[in-house]
């Protein structure tokens, strides 16, 4: 029995027989032990309602990012914040560069918006260029950006991102900037708008604990904005106590593990070049991005043939702008990556 929409994301290890999961772009080091300990400890308090304001967690996040406490809004995963943003604004028009994360379109349509799609070109590696500036007009109510983008892994260049911010200011366009992968981005390519937003800016920056801290099952995301009325409207779209006690305590513990993402980036610095080198040698087209995952192309039925071997990758054929044979793989530990390369070699050469 399928309830609601068909599940179209990675990480579905429940409906498939999976021994290796490359479909979810989560930190391959897993969850910090301190976070696990905090979750166990939080079980002692689950008889009480959670703090509806996430006061301690918001204060800690505000200190981390150098913003006031009321510039932070926590949510039940990043996905809830995407939907509450769209529900609060109810934009009539929204500009979406594609391919990108499908929940932007889903949330906008649920809020009654009509998305306009801005195609990113395969011929230039799906990079966003300055041509996007001309597509942002006075009639663009919202722009949904993801940097690094999912599934291409391409970051928006810092100078272009700042130009987009200025353009949105001049047109009155809401800028939604998804930075959920920024903590796992290659050295020198990570760039955040948090330090560049002003009081009253029509900007929301999305972050999550999911990827960097291996907390996908906890469901904890947060937004940064200096537009207080936006947050007021967003809180009206969700149920009270939407962030559990367990999630709040886990988030606080994760913030006390500042080196966790850095350890993963050190691993990626070794393993991404290895994967790219081995895949290229096998004749697989690889789109080089800046994040902890790679977009591959050109191997028919790769998703199905790897799944037969117990390896789950992300079939990207359902993304706007992508096609059958496009798949995304997470960068994981060397042993796992070597097993994936061996399996792809077997698929290609028998």
Image (cartoon, rainbow, N blue to C red):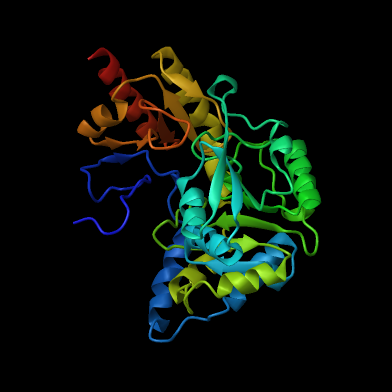
- Closer to the camera in the image, 204 or 47: 204
**Could you tell me if residue 149 is visible in this image?**
yes
Image quadrant where residue 123 sits: top right
The answer to whether residue 260 is left or right of residue 203 is left
The answer to whether residue 17 is left or right of residue 219 is left
**Which quadrant is home to the C terminus?**
top left
Q: Give percent across and percent down for residue 286.
A: 48, 22
Q: Give percent across and percent down for residue 85.
A: 57, 62
The answer to whether residue 76 is left or right of residue 336 is right
**Could you tell me if residue 256 is visible in this image?**
no
Q: Give percent across and percent down for residue 325.
A: 36, 25
- Closer to the camera in the image, 202 or 161: 202
Which residue is pictured at 30% across the width and 50% down the height?
Answer: 6
- Closer to the camera in the image, 318 or 346: 318
Which residue is pictured at 40% across the width and 44% down the height?
Answer: 24
The answer to whether residue 153 is left or right of residue 12 is right
> Residue reaching furthest bottom?
48
Q: Give percent across and percent down for residue 264.
A: 52, 43
Which residue is pictured at 69% across the width and 72% down the height?
Answer: 70
Which residue is pictured at 53% across the width and 58% down the height?
Answer: 82
Residue 323's place in the image compared with 265, above or below, is above
Give the mark count. 0
**Which quadrant is home to the N terminus?**
bottom left
- Closer to the camera in the image, 102 or 173: 173
């Amino acid at each position: 029995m399928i309830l609601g929409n068909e599940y179209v994301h990675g990480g579905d290890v429940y409906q498939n027989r999976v021994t290796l999961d490359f479909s979810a772009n989560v930190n391959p080091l897993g969850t910090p032990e301190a976070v696990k300990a905090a979750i166990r400890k939080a079980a002692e308090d689950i008889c009480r309602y959670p703090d509806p304001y996430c006061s301690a967690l918001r204060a800690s996040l505000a200190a981390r990012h150098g913003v006031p406490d009321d510039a932070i809004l926590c949510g039940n995963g990043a996905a809830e914040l995407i939907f509450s943003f769209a529900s609060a604004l109810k934009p009539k028009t929204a500009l979406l560069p594609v391919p990108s994360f499908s929940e932007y379109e889903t949330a906008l349509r649920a809020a009654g918006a009509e998305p306009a799609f801005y195609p990113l070109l395969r011929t230039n590696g799906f990079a966003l260029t300055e041509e996007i500036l001309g597509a942002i007009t006075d009639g663009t109510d919202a722009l949904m950006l993801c940097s690094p983008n999912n599934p291409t892994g391409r970051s928006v260049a810092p100078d272009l991102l700042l130009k987009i911010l200025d353009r949105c200011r001049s047109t009155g366009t809401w800028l939604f900037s998804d930075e959920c992968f920024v903590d796992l981005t290659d050295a020198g390519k990570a760039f955040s708008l948090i330090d560049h937003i002003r009081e009253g800016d029509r900007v929301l920056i999305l972050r999550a604990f999911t990827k960097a801290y291996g907390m996908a099952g906890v469901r904890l995301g947060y937004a940064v904005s200096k537009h207080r009325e936006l947050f007021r409207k967003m809180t009206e779209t969700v149920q009270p106590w939407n962030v559990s006690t367990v999630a709040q305590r886990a988030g606080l513990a994760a913030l006390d593990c500042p080196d966790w993402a850095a350890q993963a980036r050190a691993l990626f610095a070794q393993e991404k070049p290895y994967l790219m080198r081995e895949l290229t040698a096998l004749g697989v087209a690889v789109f080089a991005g800046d994040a902890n995952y790679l977009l591959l192309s050109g191997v028919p039925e790769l998703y199905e043939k790897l799944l037969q071997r117990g390896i789950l990758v992300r079939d990207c054929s359902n993304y706007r702008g992508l096609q059958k044979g496009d798949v995304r793989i997470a960068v994981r530990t060397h042993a796992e990556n070597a097993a994936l390369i061996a399996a792809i070699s077997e698929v290609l050469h028998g």
